[in-house]
Image (tube, rainbow, N blue to C red):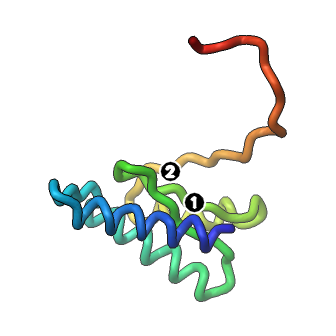
């Protein structure tokens, strides 16, 4: 799943960058995180990057590796935050509209 998310990120941004407006949201730091994630993965830490339509990079990994990943990214001078997967899906009666 992580590899699919990473490939989807690259495909999405390739389309955005080569579209009519040529939008590039990535910064040099974005690429530094990508390279660090790939370095970690090559050295046995199963982690994958993902980026939404902005410049914020999310690194997906197993809970046991989260602190290692956070430490490596923080060493780049990046602000980091740990997050966890939410609970199971459920129906709600509160509607937004």
Q: Position of residue 86 (x, y in %)?
A: 75, 40
Whole-angstrom CA distance, mark 2 to mark 1, is 6 Å
Q: Position of residue 88 (x, y in %)?
A: 83, 39
Residue 57 appears left or right of 62: left
Q: Position of residue 40 (x, y in %)?
A: 57, 79
Element type where label 2 sits in the image: loop
Residue 21 appears left or right of 71: left
Residue at point 37% right, 71% down?
32
Residue at point 65% right, 45% down?
83
Question: The N terminus is located in which quarter?
Answer: bottom right
Circle 2 sits on which residue?
80
Element type where label 1 sits in the image: helix
Lower sequence index among marks 2 and 1:
1
User: Cβ–Cβ below 8 Å for labels 2 and 1?
Assistant: yes
Residue at point 60% right, 81% down?
41
Crowding near the residue tagged with mark 1, few <14, some 14–19, many ≥20 C-alpha atoms within 10 Å: some
- In which image quadrant can residue 97 be found? top right
- In which image quadrant can residue 27 be found? bottom left
Viewer-side residue, 47 vs 71 = 47
Viewer-side residue, 21 vs 41 = 21
Mark drawn on residue 35: none
Residue at point 53% right, 69% down?
6
Crowding near the residue tagged with mark 2, few <14, some 14–19, many ≥20 C-alpha atoms within 10 Å: some
Circle 1 sits on which residue?
70
Q: Residue furthest bottom?
A: 42
Q: Is residue 88 above or below residue 30?
A: above
């Amino acid at each position: 799943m992580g590899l699919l998310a990473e490939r989807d990120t690259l495909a999405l941004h390739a389309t955005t960058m080569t579209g009519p407006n040529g939008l590039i949201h990535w910064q040099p730091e974005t690429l530094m995180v990508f390279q660090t994630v790939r370095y970690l993965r090559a050295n046995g830490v199963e982690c994958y990057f993902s980026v939404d339509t902005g410049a914020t990079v999310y690194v997906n990994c197993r809970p046991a590796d989260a602190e290692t990943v956070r430490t490596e990214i923080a060493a780049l001078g990046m602000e980091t935050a740990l997050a966890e997967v939410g609970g199971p899906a459920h129906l709600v009666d509160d509607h937004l509209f």
